[in-house]
């Protein structure tokens, strides 16, 4: 790393640390966040839950809400035998959303309800499904801006040439800039994106058959301004071991800032260690489907080692996949981003885990940067 890049990275790190100190994370406030009635359609409030058993049993779901006619949703259910069921649509009328989420106790307990149809991908039939789940946290929240080591993120913002236009455009690309004519209420809603490990329990009724849900997993809550078109492409992995330990990796490219990443792991630990660097070993965009096998090296903080860090080889193998499209919940808008929402096995340095393997792409292929 050259001296100029080192200095710019140091400056950006200090700026991020100052923002963290000025606006500390409040888990209770974050978990109780609701969309203000006057927030415009670019303000998002989304919940992701992923339950994964070591026997191949998985239940992955997300609901994204805005003050718009449509809400975003998906459900992926995989039986221990590998039978795949998925939600039949990725958008539903907001006033008839089949998934509901309620915070029972901030930072500790959530309830999730779903009632609609799932597609049996083997037979092509749609089957009635409903479930009620409880999520109980097993570890504290990991918030990207409160708990991350900023060196990696700061380096991504330090690489481009700095000028007034860069900072203006970079803020817009990441979705945090105030746009001319935008409502003040929306502009003042801070962006948050955080995860938490936990355990899921409950019952599912699928085609009249009762299924017990009792699996470890994680939740993700994100809110604030989000325009899917700001992202060029992304990778997101959230994995859980049979002991309930978690690994998270997030990588996203924007038009002006590439290689923005964050993540953490508590596998083999009683606390989270932050991701400070990564290297992609094996990857193929595969014409927008992305690979069934993805390999990377992740370097985490490690205060017990002489170097203060450790590197782990990660191999993710996708077994099942659901194709999704997003248009910011505007029924009159064309698709501005599409997902490959996968489920599969993750090898974390020899430790077996299971979870979500998500790849996203902008329809403009010239913007794809992940290599």
Image (cartoon, rainbow, N blue to C red):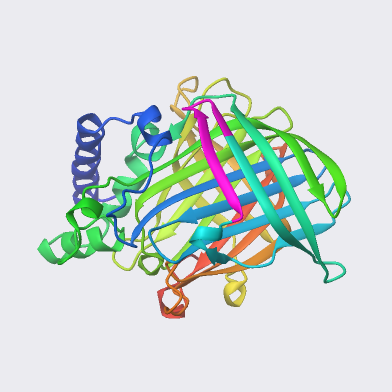
Q: Is residue 272 left or right of residue 112?
A: left
Residue 145 is covered by the magenta coloring: no
Q: Position of residue 142 (x, y in %)?
A: 45, 33
Residue lying at 80% horizontally and 66% vertically, measured from the top left: 121
Nearer to me, 323 or 253:
323
Q: Is 129 situated above or below 106?
A: below
Residue 108 is covered by the magenta coloring: yes
The residue furthest front is 95
Q: How many marks?
A: 0
Corner quadrant of residue 170: bottom left
Q: Is 168 situated above or below 145?
A: below
Residue lying at 79% horizontally and 38% vertically, measured from the top left: 54
Q: Position of residue 356 (x, y in %)?
A: 64, 50
Report whether residue 296 is seen: no
Q: Is 191 situated above or below 135?
A: below
Residue lying at 18% horizontally and 42% vertically, measured from the top left: 11
Q: Position of residue 155 (x, y in %)?
A: 31, 49
Corner quadrant of residue 283: bottom right
Q: Is residue 245 left or right of residue 146?
A: right
Q: Position of residue 246 (x, y in %)?
A: 60, 34
Q: Main secondary structure of the magenta part?
A: strand
Q: Is residue 144 left or right of residue 161?
A: right
Q: Which residues are magenta?
A: 98-110
Nearer to me, 303 or 95:
95
Q: Is 77 situated above or below 220?
A: below
The residue furthest left is 164
Report whether residue 41 is seen: yes
């Amino acid at each position: 790393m050259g001296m100029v890049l080192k200095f710019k990275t140091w400056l950006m790190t200090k700026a991020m640390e100052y923002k963290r100190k000025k606006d500390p994370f409040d888990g209770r406030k974050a978990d109780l966040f609701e969309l203000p009635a006057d927030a415009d359609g670019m303000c998002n409030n989304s919940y992701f839950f992923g339950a994964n058993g070591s026997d191949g049993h998985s239940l992955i779901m997300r609901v994204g809400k805005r003050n718009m006619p449509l809400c975003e949703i998906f459900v992926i259910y995989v039986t221990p035998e590998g039978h795949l069921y998925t939600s039949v649509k990725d958008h539903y009328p907001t006033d008839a959303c089949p998934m509901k989420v309620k915070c029972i106790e901030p930072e500790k307990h959530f309830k999730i309800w779903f009632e609609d149809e799932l597609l049996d991908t083997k037979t092509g039939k749609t089957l009635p499904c409903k479930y009620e789940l409880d999520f109980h946290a097993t570890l504290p929240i990991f918030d990207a801006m409160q708990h991350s080591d900023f060196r990696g993120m700061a380096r991504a913002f330090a690489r481009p040439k700095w000028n007034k236009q860069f900072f203006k455009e970079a803020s817009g690309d990441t979705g945090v800039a105030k746009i001319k004519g935008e409502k003040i209420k929306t502009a003042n809603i801070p962006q948050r994106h955080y995860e938490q490990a936990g355990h899921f329990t409950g019952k599912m009724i699928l085609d009249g058959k009762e299924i017990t849900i009792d699996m470890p997993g994680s939740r993700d809550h994100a809110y604030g301004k989000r325009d899917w078109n700001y992202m060029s492409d992304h990778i997101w992995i959230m994995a859980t071991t049979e002991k309930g330990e978690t690994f998270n990796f997030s990588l996203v490219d924007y038009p002006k800032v590439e290689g923005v990443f964050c993540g953490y792991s508590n596998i083999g630990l009683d606390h989270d260690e932050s991701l400070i660097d990564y290297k992609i070993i094996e990857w193929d965009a595969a014409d927008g489907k992305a690979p069934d096998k993805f390999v990377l090296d992740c370097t985490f903080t490690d205060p017990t080692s002489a170097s203060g860090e450790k590197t782990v080889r990660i191999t993710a193998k996708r077994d099942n996949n659901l194709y999704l499209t997003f248009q910011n919940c505007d029924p009159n808008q064309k698709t501005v981003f599409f997902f490959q929402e996968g489920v599969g096995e993750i090898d974390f340095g020899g430790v077996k885990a299971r979870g979500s393997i998500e790849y996203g792409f902008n329809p403009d292929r010239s913007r794809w940067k992940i290599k």
